[in-house]
Image (cartoon, rainbow, N blue to C red):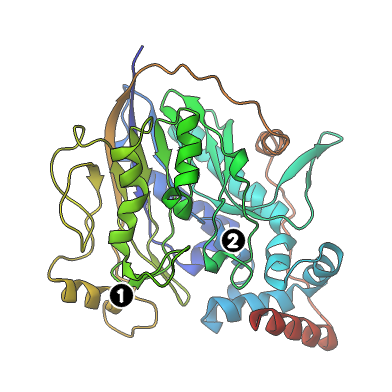
């Protein structure tokens, strides 16, 4: 039987205060499903796709006191020192950097909060949910209990069914410079571990942000029969700025021009991939700017009406596209992007467009079988089956000044490398 379903991409706006408590995070995540609610259909399954790194700012949980420091780097350094009783032993024991130690210090509690929040939303709204992505450890079951692999922290997507049960997990393979050692210091995923998950809402393959630009990622997913590509995204720059993407950072292009090489190309020119869903988060998170246009793309015959991203010429293939905040000449668009960026001081600073886009899609019945679960997926299933922790970690008080100085010097040393 053919599969008929609705795909929805949510484009939310985030603020630092959305992540300073568990209640605030749950409310922010719920607001995204509430945005989608009016567009959910009752006569076919719904696939809701959320944005990349929507769990990264959970490092701020319990740290509202630090957010007035203004920049992500200053706030992270202050939180590292404030949580020194937990971060410093992690550096010594697991051989990780201060920024990775800061994230790992609360990783178990934040992973449970993230997964349980998404599980509850998938159940309540009755949707297939691509949770976005979050920096997440790799786990295995030891004596029936999830145990974190030392030192590892990947940019990780989790897909859930309408009962809140795990469908599958994917790690981001190709990291941007901001995700590498000089930034938030994540662990690259393994290309050979990317798999395709057959569901009533498509044979789902995940290519997180930069992965969707990589032919080897798209090729691996197509070899396994991917029909719906999921590309959660968090573009950390003004949308109309110039950028150079790895592996050729000197090749500066308008970002929307570069974005045509990801989901749009995969769905319009691919072999098995028929559709792609690319949600993008917007908003200034402390001193960091995030902007973009969410899109659902397909074959030219599926979407013959010409349209496209800002600063690009109209073309077929866009089934749904969030308009950017304004229209006009390239000079006007670039100025509008700068005005909204963090620290601009302009009256329009942080004025971005939120949106939900959707498209009704059809695919033939799948001939694929679900892949075997990994040890990590078995462990996440155990976490999803448990109850939320009632004892969240607290910031350690009364730390010694000498240890604080040592931590600060360690942090500065990392930033200079």
Q: Position of residue 331 (x, y in %)?
A: 17, 76
Work out whether mark 2 precedes mark 1 in sequence or the reverse, and give the earlier one.
Answer: 2
- Using the rendered view, name the quadrant where residue 272 is placed: top left
- Visible residue check, residue 238: no
Q: Secondary structure at mark 2?
A: helix
Instruction: Give the camera-side residue of 29 and 391.
Output: 29
Q: In the rendering, which numbered label is found on residue 167?
A: none
In space, the residues marked 2 and 1 are separated at their CA atoms by 24 Å
How far across and down, in percent of the image, does residue 407 sit?
77, 81
Which residue occupies 52% across, 52% down? 26
Image point (21%, 32%), residue name: 302
Query: Where is residue 58, by image quadrant?
Result: bottom right
Residue at (50%, 62%) from the top-left corner?
Answer: 18
- Label 2 Cα neighbours within 10 Å, binned few <14 / some 14-19 / many ≥20: many
Q: In which quadrant is the N terminus drawn?
A: top left
Label 1: few (<14), some or many (≥20) within 10 Å?
A: many
Toward the viewer: 327 or 318?
A: 318
Say left or right for 41 vs 96. Answer: left
Residue 189 at x, y = what percent?
62, 49
Q: Secondary structure at mark 1?
A: helix
Marker disc for residue 340: 1
- Residue position for label 2: 58
In the drawing, does residue 328 fall left or right of residue 180? left
The residue sitting at 63% across, 75% down in the picture is 76
* Badge nearest the viewer, 2 or 1: 1
């Amino acid at each position: 039987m053919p599969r008929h379903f609705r795909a929805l991409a949510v484009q939310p706006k985030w603020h630092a205060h959305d992540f300073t408590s568990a209640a605030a995070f749950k409310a922010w995540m719920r607001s995204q499903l509430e945005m989608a609610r009016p567009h959910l259909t009752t006569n076919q399954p719904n696939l809701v796709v959320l944005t990349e790194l929507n769990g990264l700012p959970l490092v701020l949980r319990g740290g509202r006191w630090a957010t007035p420091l203004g920049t992500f780097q200053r706030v992270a350094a202050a939180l590292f020192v404030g949580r020194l009783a937990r971060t410093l032993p992690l550096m010594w024991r697991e051989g990780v950097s201060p920024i990775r130690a800061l994230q790992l210090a609360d990783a178990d509690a934040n992973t449970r909060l993230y997964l349980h929040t998404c599980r509850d939303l998938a159940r309540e709204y009755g949707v297939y949910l691509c949770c976005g992505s979050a920096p997440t450890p790799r786990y295995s079951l030891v004596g029936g209990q999830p145990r974190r692999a030392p030192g590892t922290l990947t940019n990780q997507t989790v897909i859930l069914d309408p009962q809140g049960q795990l469908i599958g997990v994917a790690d981001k393979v190709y990291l941007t410079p901001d995700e590498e050692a000089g930034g938030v210091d994540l662990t690259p995923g393994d290309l050979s571990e990317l798999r395709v998950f057959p569901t009533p809402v498509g044979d789902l393959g995940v290519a997180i942000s930069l992965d969707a630009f990589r032919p080897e990622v798209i090729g691996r997913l197509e070899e396994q029969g991917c029909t719906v590509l999921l590309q959660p995204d968090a573009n950390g720059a003004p949308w109309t700025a110039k950028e150079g993407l790895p592996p050729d950072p000197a090749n500066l292009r308008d970002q929307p021009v570069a974005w045509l090489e990801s989901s749009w190309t995969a769905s319009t020119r691919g072999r098995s991939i028929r559709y792609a869903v690319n949600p993008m988060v917007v908003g200034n998170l402390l001193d960091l700017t995030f902007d973009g246009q969410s899109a659902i793309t397909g074959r030219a015959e599926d979407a013959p009406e010409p349209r496209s991203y800002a600063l690009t010429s109209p073309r077929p293939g866009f089934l749904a596209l969030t308009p950017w905040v304004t229209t006009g000449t390239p000079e006007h668009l670039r100025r509008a992007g700068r005005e909204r960026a963090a620290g601009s001081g302009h009256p329009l600073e942080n004025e971005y467009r939120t949106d939900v886009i959707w498209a009704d899609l059809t695919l033939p019945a799948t001939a694929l079988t679900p892949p075997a679960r990994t040890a990590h997926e078995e462990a996440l299933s155990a976490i999803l089956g448990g109850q939320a922790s009632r004892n969240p970690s607290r910031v350690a008080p009364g730390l010694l000044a000498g240890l604080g100085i040592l931590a600060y010097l360690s942090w500065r040393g990392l930033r200079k490398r």
